[in-house]
Every structure is written in structure tokens, then in C-alpha cells.
């Protein structure tokens, strides 16, 4: 497989240097770490918002560092959690004295290492709270998790918590709105192809030319069901019905939707999916307040997409609409 890399062992290090070189006025790398933080941080009078996880999901995680979203993110090796030491460095660097909220995707390595880091940071006098995102409706347990996986809905947690922190809310309020998003969001994805990790150089699972996977994770693991390739509308219906059945929303409920590319899917195809998604919401008498389409949380070069639906009220709409200025997402 052809990739624009040098040595696979250096790919994360070189990626992080490339990110800071592209955004020198926004991002700063902590010395001798794989941690990126705001260049102007920590911000006085504001709760710090941090996250992290394996690389290969770009623009997640560090792409969302900036005004109105994250204060820092730790990058592990491809599809591998950062160490507890890296998370501890991250937390300490993003604390301005008002505490830190850690947003953790529900993968065992991330949860375990973040928990250890939080204990170490608290011993140093940092007040830390955490939320665990588990928005994937496809599986209850998987190769990487006990319980549901954390996937693209995590970006909405970053947005709401970051906006609340930017308003000057205290740590308990920032955690409350983060948990509110977690409680009201669901996601399910599909893969048309496997991804190829730099170190392996070949597909992580075999998928025939006429096959697709439903219910995929974001680490190259196959889905919950392998089926024959279907038209875009049929795939969209499978994913949307699963998410909406899980959320069990009342008629008239307003929602924010995300059609997320997995890394190798053209925008054309994502908009085709969004077209049918919005029709399905209308058929269920749900109201779309906003619709995001693009690559928000990827799986390297996997072809495919995920659909996220989040029920919103006036508070969440205000937070999702609030200004944000990051490399990967800007709202005004």
C-alpha cells in the first residue's frame, strides 16, 4: 500500500511537528511529549478541556484545540492510547487554577491511563473531573471496550464543554453539559473498505469487493454485520434507524446531525448520505436544527461513514452555535 510517510515508527512524531508548523500561532508541543496544547494557554479564569487517544483519527484530537473547544490533547501511537505520563503532562499544562475536564472516549486503554493520570494530577493539587463518551449504538462490548465505544459524538462533547468553559462556567457546570451531550447522542458507522495502518502496510481486515461492514469501530476493527454492498439510501437507512431506535426521541424533537467521513470517502458521497438522513428525520417528525457534513473523526484511509444524531434543547443549541476557532472546526 502506498502512503506518504517515511519510517512508520516516526509517523506520529512527524505529524505533530507538521501540525504545529501549520498552526504556530495556535498550537504548541510540550517538550519530549506527544502532547499539543494551546499556544496561549493555559487560559486564566477558564476550566481546561483536555482529551486524547490513539493517532489515526485526524482531525481528532488536536485539530479541535483552540478558542471554544479544547485546551490540549495527547496523541498516542496509531490506534494506541497515550501513556498515563503523557495524560498527566497534558492535564498539568492545561490547568490555570480553575480545574480541568477530561473527555475520554470509552476505550479500555484511554480510560485506564486517563484515570491513573487524574489520580497523579490530583496529588499535585489539580482539580480534575472526567466524562466518558460511549455514543456508538452498534455494540455493547468490542475488541477495545467494555461497554459502548466512543466515536464521533465525542466532537459534540468537545464543542459543548468548550463553549461552556469559554463562558466562564465552573468545573461542575462544564461537566454537566458534557454529560448532557453524552446522554443525548448516538452514532453508528459503516466501512466500504478496511484501513491500512502504517506499521502493517496491509488491510486490517479482509472485505470483498461486493461487501460492506455495518457497525464498525474507528480502530480498523470490523463491524457487527457483513453484508452485500447496498445503495447509499439503504446504508443510510440501516445506520439512521439504529441510532434513532436507540435514542427513542419524541416527535418534534430538534436534533443536530453529523455525517462523518472515515478518511477516504468523497464529500459527494457524504452529501448523498446526508440527503437521505434528513428525509428519514422528516419521516419520523424530527426537526433538524443543524447538519454537519465532513471528516471529523476518521480511521486513517478507511472508506465509509458514520451518522451521529444528538437531541438538543435551547442550552445545547446555544453552546453548539457559540464561537470556536480551531484548525479543524470554526464557528462564528
Image (tube, helix red, strand yellow):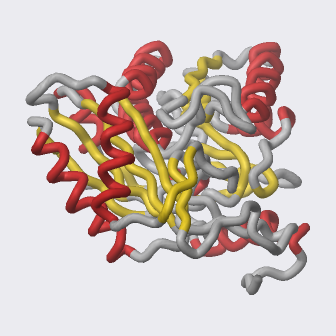
Locate residue 69: give its quadrant. Answer: top left
Q: Is residue 175 left or right of residue 185?
A: right
Locate residue 254: give its quadrant. Answer: top left
Foreground pick, 279 / 198: 279
Locate residue 88: give its quadrant. Answer: top right
Q: Residue 86: percent from the left, percent from the top? A: 81, 40
Foreground pick, 125 / 70: 70
Residue 167 to residue 11: above or below = above
Residue at the image position 73 percent from the left and 37 percent from the top: 144
Residue 17 to residue 311: above or below = below
Q: Residue 58: percent from the left, percent from the top? A: 59, 61
Residue at the image position 62 percent from the left and 59 percent from the top: 299
Residue at the image position 37 percent from the left and 27 percent from the top: 246
Foreground pick, 93 / 295: 295
Quarter of the C terminus within the rendering: bottom left
Foreground pick, 207 / 144: 207
Q: Is residue 107 left or right of residue 265?
A: right
Is residue 169 visible to us here? no
Is residue 262 visible to us here? yes
Quarter of the N terminus within the rendering: bottom right
Amino acid at each position: 500500500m502506498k502512503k506518504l510517510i517515511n519510517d512508520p515508527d516516526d509517523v506520529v512524531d512527524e505529524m505533530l511537528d507538521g501540525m504545529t508548523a501549520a498552526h504556530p500561532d495556535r498550537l504548541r508541543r510540550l517538550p519530549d511529549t506527544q502532547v499539543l496544547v494551546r499556544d496561549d494557554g493555559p487560559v486564566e479564569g477558564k476550566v481546561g478541556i483536555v482529551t486524547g487517544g490513539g493517532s489515526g483519527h485526524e482531525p481528532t484530537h488536536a485539530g479541535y484545540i483552540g478558542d471554544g473547544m479544547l485546551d490540549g490533547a495527547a496523541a498516542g501511537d496509531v490506534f494506541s492510547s497515550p501513556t498515563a505520563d503523557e495524560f498527566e503532562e497534558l492535564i498539568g499544562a492545561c490547568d490555570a487554577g480553575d480545574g480541568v475536564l477530561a473527555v475520554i472516549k470509552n476505550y479500555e486503554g484511554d480510560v485506564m491511563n486517563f484515570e491513573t493520570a487524574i489520580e497523579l494530577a490530583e496529588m499535585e493539587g489539580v482539580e480534575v473531573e472526567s466524562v466518558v463518551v460511549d455514543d456508538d449504538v452498534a455494540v455493547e462490548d468490542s475488541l477495545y471496550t467494555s461497554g459502548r465505544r466512543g466515536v464521533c459524538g465525542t466532537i459534540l462533547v468537545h464543542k459543548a464543554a468548550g463553549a461552556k468553559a469559554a463562558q466562564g462556567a465552573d468545573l461542575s457546570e462544564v461537566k454537566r453539559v458534557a454529560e448532557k451531550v453524552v446522554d443525548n447522542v448516538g452514532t453508528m458507522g459503516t466501512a466500504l473498505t478496511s484501513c491500512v495502518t502504517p506499521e502493517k502496510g496491509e488491510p486490517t481486515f479482509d472485505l470483498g469487493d461486493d461487501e460492506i461492514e455495518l457497525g464498525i469501530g474507528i480502530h480498523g476493527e470490523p463491524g457487527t454485520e457483513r453484508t452485500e454492498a447496498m445503495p447509499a439510501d439503504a446504508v443510510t437507512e440501516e445506520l439512521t434507524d439504529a441510532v434513532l431506535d436507540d435514542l427513542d426521541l419524541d416527535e418534534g424533537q430538534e436534533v443536530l446531525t453529523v455525517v462523518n467521513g472515515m478518511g477516504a470517502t468523497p464529500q459527494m458521497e457524504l452529501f448523498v448520505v446526508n440527503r437521505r438522513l434528513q428525509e428519514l428525520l422528516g419521516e419520523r417528525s424530527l426537526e433538524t436544527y443543524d447538519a454537519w457534513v465532513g471528516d471529523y473523526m476518521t480511521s486513517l484511509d478507511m472508506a465509509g461513514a458514520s451518522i451521529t444524531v444528538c437531541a438538543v434543547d435551547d442550552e445545547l443549541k446555544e453552546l453548539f452555535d457559540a464561537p470556536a476557532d480551531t484548525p479543524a472546526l470554526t464557528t462564528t
